[in-house]
């Protein structure tokens, strides 16, 4: 009898696909909610954004202005479905979107958020899944 061993590349691909599906399912549950209070940005991410802001000011909204907006408005979870890539964004609750495609520079990725103790559990899982 010929024994078949799993292909490591296929196993890795299957695991990535499983994680993506899990991530999308978490995001879909959060995207249906109105808004969340802003927990802040991870300090390492903030430092990186400040450097990028100085180097490429024309490509982004100043991070301090964006943070003020998030603190004032809270945030929503939206999809930026570019050719079914299923990107998930954190945007100010007063932001604009067109259908399921978010338009604008005023967005973060879930991995940019700081995790806080009183945060929605599904949101925590989304942030943690995005950082893996």
Image (cartoon, helix red, strand yellow):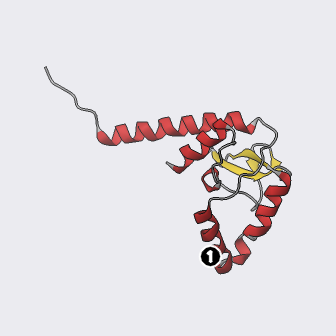
Q: Relative to residue 59, is residue 51 drawn left or right?
A: left
Q: Relative to residue 44, is residue 67 drawn left or right?
A: right
In the image, farthest residue toward the bottom: 55
Instruction: Pinpoint residue 114: horizontal percent, then vertical percent.
Output: 64, 54
**Residue 40 visible at all:** yes
| Residue 59: quadrant of the picture | bottom right
- x 53%, y 40%: residue: 20
Instruction: Pinpoint residue 33: horizontal percent, then vertical percent.
Output: 78, 36
Crowding around mark 1 (Cα neighbors within 10 Å: few <14, some 14 to 19, many 20+) is: few
- x 61%, y 70%: residue: 47
- x 62%, y 33%: residue: 25
Q: Please name whichever residue, 19 or 9, is drawn nearer the observer in this view of the structure.
A: 19
Q: How many marks?
A: 1
| Residue 35: quadrant of the picture | top right
The N terminus lies in quadrant? top left
In the image, farthest residue toward the left: 1
**Residue 61 visible at all:** no
Instruction: Pinpoint residue 52: horizontal percent, then vertical percent.
Output: 63, 74
In the image, farthest residue toward the front: 117
**Label 1: which secondary element:** helix
Q: Please name whichever residue, 124 or 20, is drawn nearer the observer in this view of the structure.
A: 124
Establish if 61 lies above or below 14: below
Instruction: Pinpoint residue 90: horizontal percent, then vertical percent.
Output: 71, 51
Query: Residue at label 1?
Result: 51
Q: Please name whichever residue, 19 or 40, is drawn nearer the observer in this view of the structure.
A: 40
């Amino acid at each position: 009898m010929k024994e078949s061993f799993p292909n490591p590349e296929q196993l890795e691909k299957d695991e990535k696909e499983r994680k993506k599906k899990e991530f999308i399912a978490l995001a879909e549950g959060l995207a249906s909610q109105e808004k969340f209070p802003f927990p802040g940005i991870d300090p390492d991410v903030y430092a990186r954004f400040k450097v990028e802001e100085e180097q490429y000011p024309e490509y982004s909204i100043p991070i301090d202005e964006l943070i003020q907006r998030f603190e004032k408005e809270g945030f929503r979870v939206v999809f930026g479905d570019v050719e079914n890539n299923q990107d998930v964004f954190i945007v100010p609750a007063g932001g604009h979107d067109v259908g399921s495609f978010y338009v604008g520079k005023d967005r973060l990725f879930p991995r940019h958020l700081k995790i806080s103790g009183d945060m929605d559990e599904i949101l925590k899982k989304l942030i943690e899944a995005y950082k893996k």
